[in-house]
Image (tube, helix red, strand yellow):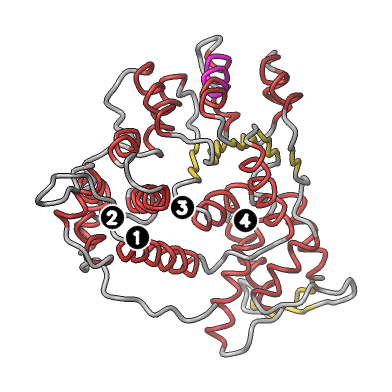
């Protein structure tokens, strides 16, 4: 990735102030909700509206918060001017006629967003463009283009959330993509509040009012990604999941936006006598069911990103160590077999964590990363998970 030249940005934040800034001051500096913002800027050009909404959603996202005064500096404006633009009070000083932001300011906002996205994605050093990530990206694009509900189903730790939250949403966060992670046993009210929160809508309203405001905030060209949707079925209240599904369907019917419904295990939900979800499943045009374990193509890309080639079936490495009696011992392992077992039993996270650990071992040894470091890391992780033998 090309080196990024960054302009002066937000002031340095002390570690003990970080939570306060991110949780309160940064979001509070943007004194609007998305639904009211859309109404305020309706007189502006379509290009200006898209740039403003994109900047608002980017800067109010907890993953990369930017306070409004800092944003104003970054785009070469003042906090007061940005406020007037957001409030729909940007007027001619003599005629009091409503003005659209200048083309120069809109270009500056777009440049700001492009730089922020590039910087954010550059920070995701573990992110690798795998075959599965590409398939998920295509599904999201199709859902947006067709304005339909699409389904993404796959086991835990296969890369769904990684692709949706860490890759697709930042890459397409131009006011048209919102990622929402569901919470277990939250019920209808909790689900609606979660959607409102990610759309930068104040949660201080009842469920019906929040639903109304959500419908006003979402436009047909947006994509709403609902991750871990199966968690809504884990509730103590009978019928709550059906109410949640109906509410989401209603939001889709009214707004005509694209949606991606992401499940870890759809069969568990189907088995819970939720026929309503099956009906949505049948009407969905685009569906993607991921394999139960990481594919060889995905692992090849991840390994190559870390400086390793996918191991041959006959490759064998030796690890020498001293046992508790200080005797020198040797363990022989085949990396391909270790990879296969990890992919089958523990999925992707177990492999990427071993790669990270192996990188640390390689750096300390002063030797470029190789499969011996990976097996060394694997054996250390296995050993720490086993209980120590007690003397009797």
Q: Residue 43 at what x, y percent from top left? A: 32, 41
Residue on which disc 4 sits: 349
Placement of 291 over or under 261, stated as above or below = below
Report the magenta stretch's main SS.
helix
Q: Which residue is mark 3?
A: 174
Mark toward the start of the polypeptide (3 vs 1): 1
In which image quadrant can residue 298 be found? bottom right
Residue lying farthest to the front in this orientation: 95
* Vertical placement of residue 369 versus 54, above or below: below
Residue 334 drawn in magenta: no
x then y, percent, for residue 272: 68, 16
Q: Which of the two residues, 379 or 249, is positioned nearer the viewer here?
A: 249
Q: Earlier in the sequence, mark 2 or mark 4?
A: 2
Q: Dot 1: few (<14), some (14–19), or many (≥20) neighbours within 10 Å?
A: some
How crowded is the residue under tag 4: few (<14 C-alpha within 10 Å), some, or many (20+)? some
Q: Which numbered tag is attached to residue 101?
A: 2
Residue sitting at x 75%, y 45%: 290
Please give the range of residues in magenta: 242-249
Residue at mark 1: 106
Q: Residue at x 76, y 24 (%)?
A: 282
């Amino acid at each position: 990735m090309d080196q990024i030249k960054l302009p002066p940005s937000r002031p340095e934040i002390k570690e003990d102030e970080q939570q306060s800034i991110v949780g309160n001051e940064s979001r509070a500096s943007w004194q609007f909700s998305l639904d009211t913002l859309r109404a305020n800027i309706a007189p502006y050009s379509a290009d200006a509206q898209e740039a403003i909404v994109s900047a608002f959603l980017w800067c109010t996202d907890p993953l990369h918060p930017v306070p409004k005064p800092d944003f104003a500096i970054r785009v070469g404006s003042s906090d007061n001017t940005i406020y007037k633009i957001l409030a729909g009070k940007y007027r001619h000083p003599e005629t009091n006629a409503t003005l659209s932001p200048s083309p120069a300011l809109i270009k500056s906002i777009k440049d700001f967003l492009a730089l922020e996205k590039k910087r954010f994605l550059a920070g995701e050093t573990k992110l690798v463009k795998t075959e599965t990530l590409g398939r998920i990206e295509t599904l999201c694009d199709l859902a947006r283009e067709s304005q339909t509900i699409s389904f993404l189903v796959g086991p835990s730790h296969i890369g769904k959330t990684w692709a949706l939250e860490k890759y697709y949403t930042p890459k397409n966060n131009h006011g048209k993509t919102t990622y929402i992670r569901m919470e277990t046993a939250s019920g209808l009210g909790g689900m609606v509040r979660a959607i409102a929160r990610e759309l930068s809508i104040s949660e201080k309203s009842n469920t019906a009012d929040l639903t109304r405001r959500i419908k006003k905030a979402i436009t047909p060209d947006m994509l709403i990604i609902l991750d871990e949707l199966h968690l809504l079925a884990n509730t103590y209240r009978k019928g709550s999941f059906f109410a949640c599904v109906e509410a989401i369907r209603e939001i889709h019917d009214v707004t005509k936006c694209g949606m991606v419904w992401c499940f870890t295990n759809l069969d568990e939900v189907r088995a819970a006598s939720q026929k309503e979800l099956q009906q949505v499943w049948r009407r969905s045009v685009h569906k993607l069911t991921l394999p139960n374990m990481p594919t060889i193509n995905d692992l090849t890309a991840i390994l190559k990103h870390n400086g390793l080639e996918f191991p041959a079936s006959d490759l064998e490495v030796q690890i020498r160590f001293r046992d508790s009696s200080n005797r020198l011992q040797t363990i022989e392992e085949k990396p391909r077999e270790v990879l296969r077992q990890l992919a089958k039993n523990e999925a992707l996270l177990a492999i990427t964590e071993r790669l990270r650990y192996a990188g640390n071992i390689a750096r300390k040894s002063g030797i470029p990363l190789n499969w011996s470091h990976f097996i060394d890391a694997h054996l250390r992780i296995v050993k720490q998970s086993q209980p120590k033998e007690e003397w009797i």
